[in-house]
Image (spheres, coloured by chain):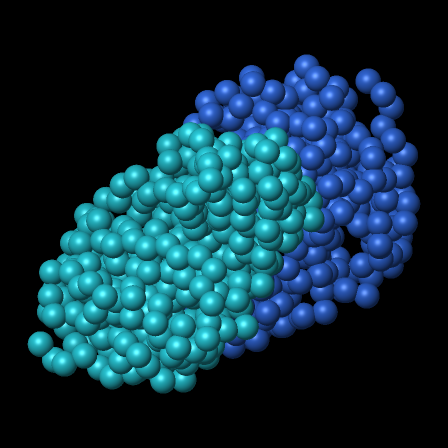
Chain colours: A blue, B cyan
Amino acid sequence: MALIVQKYGGTSMGSVERIEHVASKVKSFHDQGHQVVVVVSAMSGETDRLLKLAKSINPRGSARELDQIISTGEQVTIGLLALALQKAGLKSRSYTGPQVAIRTDEAYGKARIQSIDGEKLLADCREGVVPVVAGFQGLSPDGSTATLGRGGSDTTGVAIAAAMKADECQIYTDVDGVYTTDPRVEPAARRLDKITFEEMLEMASLGSKVLQIRAVEFAGKYKVPLRVVSTFVDGPGTLITLEEDNVESPLVSGIAFNRDEAQLTVNGVPDKPGIAAAILGPIGDANVEVDMIVQNIGADGATDFTFTVHRNDFEKAHEISKKVAASLGAKGVLPASDIVKVSLVGVGMRSHAGIASKMFKVLADEGINIRMISTSEIKISVVVQDKYLELAVRSLHKAFGLENAPPKV
Amino acid sequence: MALIVQKYGGTSMGSVERIEHVASKVKSFHDQGHQVVVVVSAMSGETDRLLKLAKSINPRGSARELDQIISTGEQVTIGLLALALQKAGLKSRSYTGPQVAIRTDEAYGKARIQSIDGEKLLADCREGVVPVVAGFQGLSPDGSTATLGRGGSDTTGVAIAAAMKADECQIYTDVDGVYTTDPRVEPAARRLDKITFEEMLEMASLGSKVLQIRAVEFAGKYKVPLRVVSTFVDGPGTLITLEEDNVESPLVSGIAFNRDEAQLTVNGVPDKPGIAAAILGPIGDANVEVDMIVQNIGADGATDFTFTVHRNDFEKAHEISKKVAASLGAKGVLPASDIVKVSLVGVGMRSHAGIASKMFKVLADEGINIRMISTSEIKISVVVQDKYLELAVRSLHKAFGLENAPPKV
């Protein structure tokens, strides 16, 4: 018998039929003897509908009032799911975030969870009751309702699992797990049985939008085993675990990519201390987030400084860069928005040399020019021209044998 | 400067435009220097929509879960009105019933208010903030949300006014006050400037559905001056006050009527102790509510026992009555569903003889046969055939001079 926290998203709550389907899934776990706590999102579209209604009255109203309004979306679905579970013959009670004392800070609209008292939920579980908790919301210090920001329901699930010391937190979604890469780009992409928290963070932040990053961080911090599963297709999903479980993990776990970046190179900058700050300071001041940063050792007293930003910020960052380049006495700025970032991710890289050179060779053999390289302990990212995305992902997927399941340990 | 609690119903909250209209009304009171606390209902139709959604999942789910779901209706409107007030330039904060600590018992779906801590709202008022409170809901003993049952928003308004010792509780609705009778039946019906709590209770329970009965009882008990006003038409409305304010009140204040009743007479019942209980016991056991009850002193050892029930319960009550009549050795049961109850209401009746006989004479002069009579301290009710409703109401309205305003005191 295990204690399982299950989180169902807005698509899973999208209609009466789907809510009944979720109830039958919860019941099958309960009937197997597990204790189940359920966390749910609002019906898909409901949060946007409420937000639009509120904005139509006052586009600049207080965030507290917006939270008061949009938090009703989950309050409806928890009640509906509890009713569906009761109809299925289970005992069930619903709880809003405030009711179950999910305490947050007072950053309405993007609050962070401070503490959860798991005792009330554990008491329900002991009595055979299935508690259904509203995701995405909590109780602010002054007793108001605060929302966690978009996607916060994943975080609620993980935080509850941590507070209750649950055996597993299962995130139900419309995909059946984490894949070696996007199946729309490489049809041979394979569902991973396991992935480490660190790999998942790299995969998520690089564009595989399966799980909310904060939820993964939280799960890693509190060592909550996290499983991504499909609501609609039965299967084991992908388990996100601590690295130690994975000693024999393959060198490379997956390939992530990001089409939303653009590249700027300030070239011929006089090479002296402080140029990175001189360039990135004004960029940061303009609220533009920078992703990759690369600077080479300068020859002839000059260097090239390259960084990437989100494509939406490209024009703004370009204008700023030109001014900074002029003031620094640089030769100029080379802009490029037709680029894509491709990354190999895997904890196995740490202890294995040669992954990077193999990656570069594979790309060279395909005639793909690398415009930028950046590495970390468990990932290698390259920037290439965007027309090469499919070719790069497919050739790397094949070269690193990702279509084949790793040997069983 | 006064402290005013204003309650706006579902029709007043029915659209973005109407919410903005309410905000402008609140602002005009605030700008006059008054402290205003607002209580609101859900948008009209929203509670029914949520109830239907819940019932479609589980027609027999727990009342607690239904309350969890339907209480979101007011949570949305309080947020929207607070946003509209902020847009109008006021400071405003919204509160659900639980947030402002409206404590109730645990009778989900028909909970009763136990206590309210007015301090939080008073603190807001002192800081120039307009609090907007959700009607119809409160905090149950175990920390859940409980609803007060239909129409409970009026009660919330009065209870808050009592807890804050407000100068007046204004109930905004789609009628501009309490009338001497229904203007659709008697076009000469006149809006009353004042009416006593007791009269209002009789008017309300007899079918003038302007205010929720419990709200009037509450207001009377805690001596909260209550005013019925129109949201859409400016005017003084009707003030519901303590009797003492009204020494010079007219003999008759208004004429109420009720078309929803049906009459059953068990005739020729052997006249002995216990027959009332023998007849009404099985009726009550079948959850049928009885309104008027009349029994005459028997002649020849037999008596007639007459009572009225809601028309929806007529068939059921008729069947039960027939069985009871047989077991009591009565002659039979006379059913009548084509009846209407017409009542004169007025505190002045207490000290004035002759009202009843004048009423009966007026009806007799019009050729209207009276089927049943029942009296209390401040009302006289008669049951007549339903086709005489208009004639009875109009002739009584004229005979007691209700179309004329009483002389100013």
Residue at the (59%, 33%) spot, across then down: B329
- Quadrant, the C terminus of chain A: top right
Viewer-proximal residue among A99 and A61: A99
Counting the numbered discs, the total is 0
Say if A156 sits above or below B125 in the image.
Answer: above
Whole-percent x, y for residue A221 in the image: 52, 30
Q: Nearer the viewer, residue B83 or B56?
A: B56
Q: Nearer the viewer, residue A125 or A290?
A: A125
Residue B23: % across, % down: 34, 73
Rendering quarter of residue A143: top left
Where residue B34 appears, as percent x and y from the top left, is 16, 69
Q: In this view, does A114 lie to the left or right of B46?
A: left
Q: What residue is at 15 percent from the left and 60 percent from the top? A: B351
Instruction: Please state if B323 lies on the left or on the right of B120 as rendered.
Output: right
Q: Nearer the viewer, residue A283 or B344?
A: B344
Q: Where is residue A216 in the image (x, y as percent from the top left)?
A: 59, 38
Q: Residue at x 27, y 41 (%)?
A: B115
Q: Quadrant of residue A388?
A: bottom right
| Picture residue at 44% right of the left edge, 57% below the top | B372
Q: Can residue A59 be seen in this view?
A: no
Which residue is most to the left?
B409
Q: Quadrant of the N terminus of chain A?
A: top right
B4 with respect to A360 (left or right): left
Q: Can residue B33 be seen by looking at this rendering?
A: yes
**In the image, farthest residue toward the front:** B300
